[in-house]
Image (tube, rainbow, N blue to C red):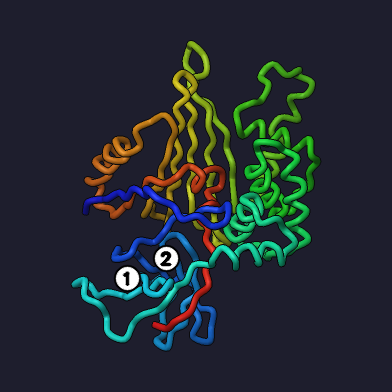
Amino acid sequence: MNTGFVVHTSQLSRTSISRHPLKDGSQVLVRIISDRGGGKYEGSVAGARITINSKTPLTAGATFKATISTQNGQVLLFPVNENGELAQNAVFTMEAVQNEQLSSLLQSLGLNADDLSYHLMQQFKQLGMKMDSTLLSKIYNLSVKFKGKEKKAAELLAILLKKGIDFSEDDLLALLNELDGQRDSQEDKSNQNQEYKLLNQINSIKNTWQLLPYEIVSAGGVLAKGSLGFFVDETAQLKLLNLECNWLSNNHRYLFSLEYEKGLCNNIKMSGEGIDTERLALLLDKKLSGSGKEITIEIVDCELIEGTACGQEEFYALGGEV
């Protein structure tokens, strides 16, 4: 079975916040994640978690394809059968949260209606954390102290709190530098036992994110620096594998986010700076096409898959029935 890749070339503006659109007429894969009871199910569409109201019993783990149609500002999802024909009496609607609604939501939580606030909410959503206004404000106010690294700081702060790890601002700054490959290799040996202090604590707790900075070296020195991230769910199943690589000689940057379902990779999102991403996607597609596995390759904006890739998380107002 051949793989395929998709290039996202446009984005919709949402105040100062952006998101990738669902395209009218295209097909998406709908996954049923869990049964919430009372005819409500948690599902996934195009990387966004949604709620489905269904009169017909659905099974967690089930998947089906649906065609997207936009009508009167709503996104309608029409399930299709194996022959690509529309199923009868099976449709549900999904409406993206509008600018005004999003701004109101952020303000109701005591947050500024800006990119950092929204990014922080995306990280909370990915980690399954309650949208606690006091906690969100605390992380926001601490994140803004790390100029140029606010979003990454917000991600790490959420992970640390999720894991229940105590830390100081100096610890967090050291962690940010280590993940960015800015560790001082000439540091006095008496202080080396403090290296990776916070990172080791994060990785010692086996839930959510495990983070591993790395270097590619040769006899001539360091060729590239980057980081690996592994995200596991509450059942210890791998959900995401993120790879960032910064090639030092030409300032090329490579970003990959591999999505997993039941232990198998089914989607690869990729981006980069200073590289021909479409050519790289074609080469990767060619390599994977002989594997017999259905893996979609998507070219996306860097901001969607940087860090923990929580930039893919979306917020929707939902309704409709299957």
Residue 206 visible to an observer of this rendering: no
Amino acid beneath label 2: Val
Where disc 2 sits, the SS reads: strand
Label 1 environment density (alpha carbons within 10 Å; few <14, some 14–19, many ≥20): many
Residue 317 image offset from top left, x and y in percent? 53, 72
Disc 1 to disc 2, C-alpha distance: 9 Å
Mark 2 Cα shell of 10 Å, populated few (<14), some (14-19), many (≥20):
some
SS type, badge 1: strand
Query: Which residue is at 59% across, 66% downward?
Result: 100
- Residue bearing the label numbered 2: 45
Q: Which residue is mark 1?
A: 66
**Corner quadrant of residue 67:** bottom left
Up/down of 122 relative to 89, above or below: above
Image point (33%, 82%), residue name: 90
In the image, residue 259 sits, relative to residue 184, either above or below, namely below
**Residue shown at the point (31%, 39%) measured from the top left:** 278
Tag 1–tag 2 contact (CB < 8 Å): yes
* Amino acid beneath label 1: Ala
Q: Is residue 123 left or right of residue 170?
A: left
